[in-house]
Image (spheres, grey):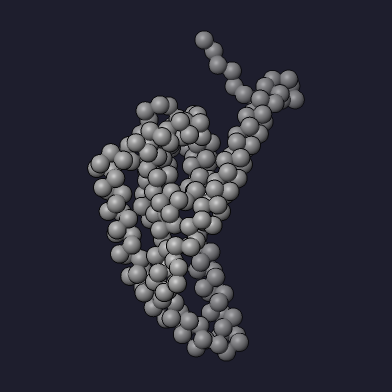
C-alpha cells in the first residue's frame, strides 16, 4: 500500500510539473535529493557503526541482560497476555533498548522478530492482537535517551552543538511514550468492555469457557 501511495505522489508530481512547464526543476530536485541522500548516509555510517559496536559490547558483557532485567517488570505490565519466558519478550526488550539509544535501524529487525513471535500467539491471524498493537505504539513513540541518528545528522550538517537536542528529545519522547501507553490501556479496556457487553438476546459476546 505504501508503495502505491509513493508511486501516486511521484506520478502526480511529474504530471503537475509537466502541466506547468517545470519538468526541469523536478529533474534537478530529484538528482539533488539523491545526492543529498547518499551524502547523509555516508555521514551516518560511522556513528551507526560505533553505536552498534557499543551495543554488541554491551550484549557480550551482559549489560543488555541487566537492562532487560530492569525493564522486564515494565514489559510484563505492558504485555500481560504474553507468557513468561516466551521468545517475544526477549525481542521486545532488545527493541526497546535499541530505541532508547536512538538506534532505529538496529531496533527494526528486533521489532520484526518480536511481531513474528507475537503472531504465533495470535488466535486470529488476520487481525493484530492487543500485544502487537502495544508493541507498534511503543516502537513508534519510543522514549529516547540518546538520539544517536539525529545527532549524526546534525554533525553531518556541521551543527555548532549537535548534542543540544538530547534534553528536548528526551522530554518529547517521554511524553509521546506516556501518551501511547495511556491510549493503549484505554483501547484495551474499551475492547474488553465491548467484548463483555450483552447481545440483544441477553447472551454475552464473550465466549464461555467450559470445564
Identified at 39% across, 78% down, the residue is 35
Q: Is residue 33 above or below residue 24?
A: above
Q: Nearer the viewer, residue 74 or 88?
A: 74
Identified at 31% across, 54% down, the residue is 52
x and y, in percent, of residue 172 in the image: 56, 53
Q: Is residue 7 above or below residue 22?
A: above
Q: Nearer the viewer, residue 118 or 83?
A: 83
| Left or right relative to 185: residue 95 | left
| Left or right relative to 198: residue 161 | left
Dividing the picture into quarters, in which one does residue 119 lie?
top left
Q: Nearer the viewer, residue 81 or 55?
A: 55
x and y, in percent, of residue 45 in the image: 32, 65
x and y, in percent, of residue 103 in the image: 39, 54
| Left or right relative to 156: residue 196 | right
In the orientation shown, which residue stands out farthest toward the top? Answer: 211
Identified at 43% across, 54% down, the residue is 146
x and y, in percent, of residue 57 in the image: 26, 47
Q: Is residue 112 visible?
A: no
Q: Is residue 9 visible?
A: yes
Identified at 49% across, 29% down, the residue is 81
Amino acid at each position: 500500500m505504501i508503495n502505491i501511495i509513493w508511486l501516486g505522489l511521484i506520478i502526480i508530481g511529474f504530471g503537475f510539473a509537466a502541466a506547468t512547464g517545470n519538468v526541469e526543476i523536478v529533474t534537478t530536485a530529484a538528482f539533488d535529493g539523491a545526492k543529498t541522500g547518499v551524502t547523509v548516509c555516508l555521514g551516518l555510517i560511522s556513528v551507526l557503526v560505533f553505536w552498534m559496536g557499543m551495543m554488541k559490547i554491551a550484549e557480550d558483557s551482559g549489560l543488555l541482560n541487566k537492562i532487560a532485567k530492569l525493564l522486564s517488570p515494565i514489559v510484563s505490565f505492558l504485555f500481560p497476555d504474553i507468557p513468561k519466558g516466551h521468545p517475544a519478550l526477549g525481542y521486545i526488550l532488545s527493541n526497546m533498548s535499541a530505541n532508547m539509544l536512538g538506534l532505529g535501524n538496529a531496533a527494526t529487525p528486533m521489532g520484526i522478530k518480536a511481531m513474528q513471535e507475537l503472531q504465533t500467539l495470535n488466535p486470529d491471524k488476520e487481525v493484530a492482537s492487543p500485544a502487537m498493537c502495544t508493541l507498534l505504539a511503543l516502537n513508534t513513540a519510543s522514549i529516547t535517551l540518546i538520539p544517536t541518528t539525529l545527532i549524526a545528522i546534525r554533525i553531518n550538517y556541521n551543527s555548532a552543538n549537535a548534542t543540544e537536542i538530547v534534553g528536548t528529545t528526551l522530554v518529547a519522547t517521554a511524553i509521546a511514550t506516556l501518551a501511547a501507553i495511556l491510549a493503549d490501556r484505554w483501547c484495551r479496556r474499551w475492547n474488553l468492555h465491548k467484548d463483555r457487553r450483552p447481545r440483544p438476546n441477553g447472551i454475552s459476546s464473550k465466549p464461555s469457557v467450559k470445564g
